[in-house]
Amino acid sequence: MAESFISSHGISMKPLAYREQRGYIGIGYRGYDMSKPSDLVQGTLDMLLLKILALEPMNGFAVSQRLKQVSGDVLQMSDGSLYPALHKLEQEGWITAEWKTSEKGRRAKYYSLTRLGRRQLEREADNWGRLSSAISRVVKLKEA
């Protein structure tokens, strides 16, 4: 199994060779000389978290598990990146947090999307659609 790398935003990635063999898609790598504007990566992370929370209110662990599940085990986020990102979204007013008892009987902070967060998700998703479409057009260019 190929060694994993953690992006600067805590998302677990596999090296390029693994990506080619398994169809793995990543956002970026720490330690690699790749062009990746941090606001683009942060905006992508925000959008992913907002989208997961648009499904239903959930605690941080459940957010992480859902992201991993719906991405087919491609995207994995460390606690050291997840909770600061959730805190940032809460400070922006895009999500709210409330302490509740989890299914396992433990106290856990449950996060919910706000109206403002839903609008931000729409903006981020629109931006992502334009960006990914533009990137696809470049990648699909026919070589001479």
Image (cartoon, rainbow, N blue to C red):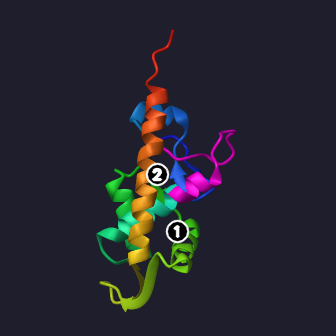
Name of the residue lying farthest toward the top: 144
Which residue is depicted at the point 43% across and 75% down?
116
In the rendered structure, the answer to whether residue 103 lies left or right of residue 138 reads left
Q: Amino acid at mark 1?
A: Leu
Question: On the image, numbered disc 1 is attached to which residue?
Answer: 82
Q: What main secondary structure does the magenta stretch of the protein show?
A: loop
Q: Nearer the viewer, residue 43 or 12?
A: 43
Question: On the image, numbered disc 2 is attached to which residue?
Answer: 127
Q: Position of residue 112 (x, y in %)?
A: 38, 79
Q: Position of residue 1 (x, y in %)?
A: 47, 41
Which residue is depicted at the point 34% across and 50% down?
72
Q: Nearer the viewer, residue 6 or 114?
A: 114
Q: CA distance from mark 1 to mark 2?
A: 22 Å
Q: Position of residue 34 (x, y in %)?
A: 65, 39
Secondary structure, mark 2, is helix
Which residue is depicted at the point 61% across and 46% down?
29
Residue 59 in view here = no
Q: Is residue 123 above or below residue 112?
A: above
The magenta span reads 26-43
Which residue is depicted at the point 37% across and 64% down?
51
Q: Position of residue 98 (x, y in %)?
A: 42, 89
Q: Is residue 54 above or below residue 97?
A: above
Q: Residues within 10 Å of mark 1 (few under 14, many from 20)?
A: many
Tag on residue 129?
A: none
Residue 139 in view here = yes
Please report whichever mark, 1 or 2, sits nearer to the chain's N-terminal start: 1
Q: Does the magenta portion include 73?
A: no
Q: Amino acid at mark 2?
A: Asn
